[in-house]
């Protein structure tokens, strides 16, 4: 028994003290003086008071051989790690306590413990993928998604491929009927021909066309111009010929020389070889000397009379326009010449006026200068004349009495 508290019998002598156990260690402790704690992974937190081993075993996910200190080894879980993880767990790893797969399940199983397989019509990782709706037999493999057999019209491991051309049925194992038109195409589920060859009808194209029809799948109607209303089922040619004025064998166009919606109108007699458009009646070509839609107009030099008159009027109009244009051009040229002559005349007059003005100014200046010169000459002559007179008077005095001498003052006076 491990003592929880001590009582000493001899207090005075410490070397000879004795002790006595008062009680056991409390829950969760063990060892000398209950100084150690039980491992928390012990069930109910109860362990041996001496060695600490879990009395009631370890909690889930821990090993009892190591005082519940170590978790379960990979691939085990539960009390004492005695349970094995489900083999469908990815990596064989699961929660040590609950056994739930840590990394999910392998394809085909439901999480979290990966024990249950996918529900019907689901497969793959975590059962997240749906089986093909073409899977027969109610569902597909929960792991791979494969199914067999496929419903009619589908094939492939997962029944996701459609039947190739020419086949139908479950897993596309049947062939289309030989009389299906084209590439032997038929409905991938029922095998009904998509289009029958000419003259045949029905799901398997084994029925003849009904009266009044022909062609692929009997989808065309015989011409209403066939006598007795019937025609050949393959190409539609009328079996008993055509009504009046319609051309055999199809009875869909007028005979040569006729036109109109009922082929009851004659082509113009002026149409070359009697040929005209079967709907409008327009001649493809005219006989010599005729032109027009129905070759109704006569020609002059290869032109119809009506068109000739029109052409003549147009020519006269053009000629009149040409004459008017010539007259306008001539008038314009003449007018421009007159303007140029007027301009030159004005220029000449301007030059003459300028010259005359200049000449008049020069004459006046010359006359003025001459007058001044004459005046100066007259003045000079007058002076000379006066001087001459004085000289002659002096001579006469010298010949009479001599003039008495004057003093300087009297001379100055």
Image: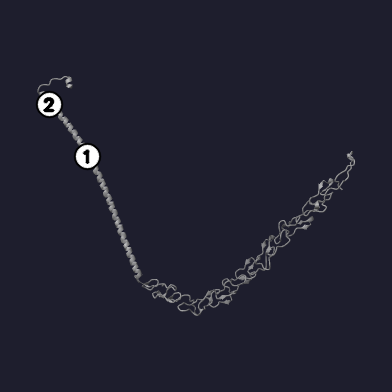
Disc 2 crowd rating (10 Å Cα; few below 14, some 14-19, many 20+) is: few
C-alpha span from label 1 to label 2 = 43 Å
Residue 82's spot in the image, x, y percent?
79, 57
User: Above or below — where is 325 with respect to 305?
Assistant: above
Can residue 304 be seen in the rendering of this structure? no
Q: Earlier in the sequence, mark 1 or mark 2?
A: 1
Residue at the image point whose x is 13% and y is 27% from the top: 391
Residues under numbered marks 1 and 2 in contact, where contact means CB atoms less than 8 Å apart: no
Quadrant in which residue 312 is drawn: bottom left
Would residue 392 appear left or right of 103 to someone viewing this image? left
SS category of the residue bearing label 1 = helix
**Position of 343 relative to 119 (above/below):** above
Residue 215's spot in the image, x, y percent?
54, 74
Mark 2, residue position: 393
Question: Few, some or many C-alpha atoms within 10 Å of disc 1 (few <14, some 14-19, many ≥20)?
Answer: few
Q: Which residue is mark 1?
A: 364
> Measuring 11% from the left and 25% from the top, which residue is drawn there?
395
């Amino acid at each position: 028994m491990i003592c929880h508290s001590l009582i000493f019998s001899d207090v005075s002598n410490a070397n000879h003290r004795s002790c006595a156990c008062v009680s056991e260690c409390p829950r969760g402790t063990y060892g000398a003086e209950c100084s150690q704690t039980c491992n928390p992974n012990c069930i109910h937190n109860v362990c041996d008071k001496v060695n600490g081993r879990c009395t009631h075993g370890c909690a889930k996910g821990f090993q009892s051989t190591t005082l519940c200190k170590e978790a379960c080894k990979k691939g085990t879980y539960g009390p004492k790690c005695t349970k094995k993880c489900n083999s469908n767990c990815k990596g064989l790893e699961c929660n040590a306590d609950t056994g739930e797969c840590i990394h999910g399940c392998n394809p085909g199983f439901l999480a979290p413990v990966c024990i249950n397989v996918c529900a019907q019509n689901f497969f793959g990782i975590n059962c997240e993928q749906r089986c093909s709706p073409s899977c027969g037999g109610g569902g597909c493999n929960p792991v791979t998604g494969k199914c067999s057999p496929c419903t009619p019209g589908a094939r492939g491991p997962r029944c996701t491929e459609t039947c190739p051309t020419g086949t139908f049925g479950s897993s596309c194992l049947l062939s289309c009927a030989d009389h299906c038109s084209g590439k032997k195409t038929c409905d991938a589920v029922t095998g009904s021909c998509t289009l029958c060859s000419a003259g045949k009808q029905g799901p398997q194209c084994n029925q003849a066309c009904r009266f009044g029809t022909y062609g692929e799948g009997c989808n065309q109607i015989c011409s209403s111009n066939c006598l007795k209303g019937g025609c050949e089922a393959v190409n539609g040619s009328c079996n008993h010929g055509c009504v009046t004025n319609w051309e055999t064998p199809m009875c869909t166009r007028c005979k040569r020389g006729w036109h109109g919606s009922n082929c009851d109108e004659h082509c113009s007699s002026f149409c070359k070889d009697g040929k005209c458009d079967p709907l409008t009646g327009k001649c493809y070509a005219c006989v010599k000397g005729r032109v027009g839609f129905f070759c109704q107009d006569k020609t002059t030099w290869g032109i119809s009379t009506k068109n000739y008159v029109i052409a003549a009027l147009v020519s006269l109009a053009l000629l009149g326009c040409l004459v008017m244009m010539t007259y306008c051009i001539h008038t314009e040229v003449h007018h421009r010449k007159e303007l140029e002559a007027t301009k030159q005349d004005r220029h000449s007059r301007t030059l003459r006026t300028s010259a005359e003005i200049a000449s008049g100014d020069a004459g006046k200046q010359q006359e003025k200068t001459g007058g001044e010169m004459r005046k100066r000459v007259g003045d000079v002559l007058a002076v000379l004349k006066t001087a001459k007179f004085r000289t002659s008077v002096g001579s006469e005095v010298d010949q009479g009495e001599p003039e008495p001498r004057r003093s300087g003052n009297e001379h100055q006076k």
